[in-house]
């Protein structure tokens, strides 16, 4: 799994590429928790994620809860069919703000 | 009937999870599930292995896990054996739907995807058994 980050206006865009599983979700967690206080909108691009397990979903729930505590926006975009299936299986689709494109995600600022 | 059976003996190291996912994904496709079902079965198995690494071995990477996947007459049987801490049945609980708590997701996935799931404490260690049936079109 590789993670990259860039600023677009007031938002931070985080791109994740590869598999998010028990072996890698800790790195994603640390990255997102470090980035969240530094921006008003944290937008996570999931388009290049080939696989995500429950530890990855749990990480996203933790970041979402922290974003609410800090009064920040946490937005997901680019969900592939495979990733969306895992969101559906874990019944978390409705708790996240999910949009189609980066433009929409950045528009949350 | 000649079918297919594959057995892995692996350390409780997350580095090996992608290896198992690749092999079992190919097996589920060969048995006859569609792509989405293959992904779901692989995910459920991955969650079972992750549970062993996290809860039975507390993140240690030197524990022993034996995994057996066997094509049956009507689907797939998955069996794991570990010698870590036995699961506490009172703590095996699926996440409540609609909750924003992060725990219990893996158990929810395993129970939703597989047709039957059971845990046994045996003389050899902790045994997890799961069955997925292939529903053929009439």
Image (spheres, coloured by chain):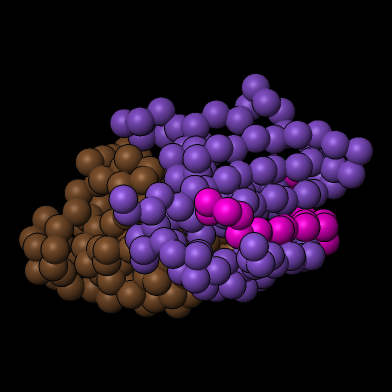
The residue that appears at 24% across and 58% down in the rendered structure is A76
Q: Nearer the viewer, residue B53 or B130?
A: B130
Q: Is residue B13 left or right of residue A37?
A: right
The residue that appears at 76% across and 42% down in the rendered structure is B127
Tell me where residue B112 sits by quadrant: top left
Residue B70 drawn in magenta: yes
Chain B rendered in what hue?
purple
Inspect this view and state whether residue A34 appears: no
Residue B65, position in %: x, y? 77, 57
The residue that appears at 63% across and 27% down in the rendered structure is B91
Q: Nearer the viewer, residue B45 or B26?
A: B26
Chain A rendered in what hue?
brown
First to last magenta residue range: B54-75
The residue that appears at 48% across and 74% down in the rendered structure is A1
Residue A2, position in %: x, y? 45, 77
Residue B125, position in %: x, y? 85, 42
Inspect this view and state whether residue A83 appears: yes
Q: Is residue A68 left or right of residue A55?
A: left
Quarter of the image containing the N terminus of chain B? bottom right
Q: Nearer the viewer, residue B24 or A18?
A: B24
Q: Nearer the viewer, residue B72 or B123?
A: B72
Tell me where residue B96 sits by quadrant: top left
Residue B8, position in %: x, y? 74, 66
Q: Is residue B70 left or right of residue B81?
A: left
């Amino acid at each position: 799994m590789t993670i990259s980050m860039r600023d677009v206006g007031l938002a931070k865009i985080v791109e994740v590429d590869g598999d998010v599983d028990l072996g890698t979700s800790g790195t994603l967690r640390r990255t997102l928790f470090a980035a969240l206080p530094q921006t008003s909108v944290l937008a996570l691009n999931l388009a290049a994620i080939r696989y995500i397990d429950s530890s990855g979903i749990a990480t996203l729930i933790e970041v979402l809860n922290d974003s609410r505590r800090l009064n920040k926006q946490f937005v997901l975009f680019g969900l592939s069919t495979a990733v969306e299936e895992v969101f559906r299986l874990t019944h978390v689709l409705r708790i996240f703000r999910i949009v189609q494109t980066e433009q929409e995600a950045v528009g949350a600022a | 009937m000649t079918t297919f059976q594959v057995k892995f003996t692996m350390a409780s190291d997350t580095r090996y999870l992608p290896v198992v996912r690749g092999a079992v994904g190919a097996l589920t496709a060969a048995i006859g599930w569609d792509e989405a079902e293959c992904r779901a079965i692989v995910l459920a198995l991955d969650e079972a292995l992750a549970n062993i690494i996290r809860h039975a071995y507390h993140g240690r990477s030197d524990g022993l896990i034996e995994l057996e996947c066997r094509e049956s007459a009507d689907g797939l049987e998955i069996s794991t054996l570990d010698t870590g801490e036995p699961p506490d049945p009172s703590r095996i609980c699926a996440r409540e739907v609609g909750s924003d708590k992060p725990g219990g997701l893996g158990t929810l996935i395993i129970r939703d995807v597989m047709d039957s799931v059971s845990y046994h404490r045996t003389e050899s260690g902790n045994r997890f058994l799961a069955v997925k049936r292939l529903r053929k079109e009439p």
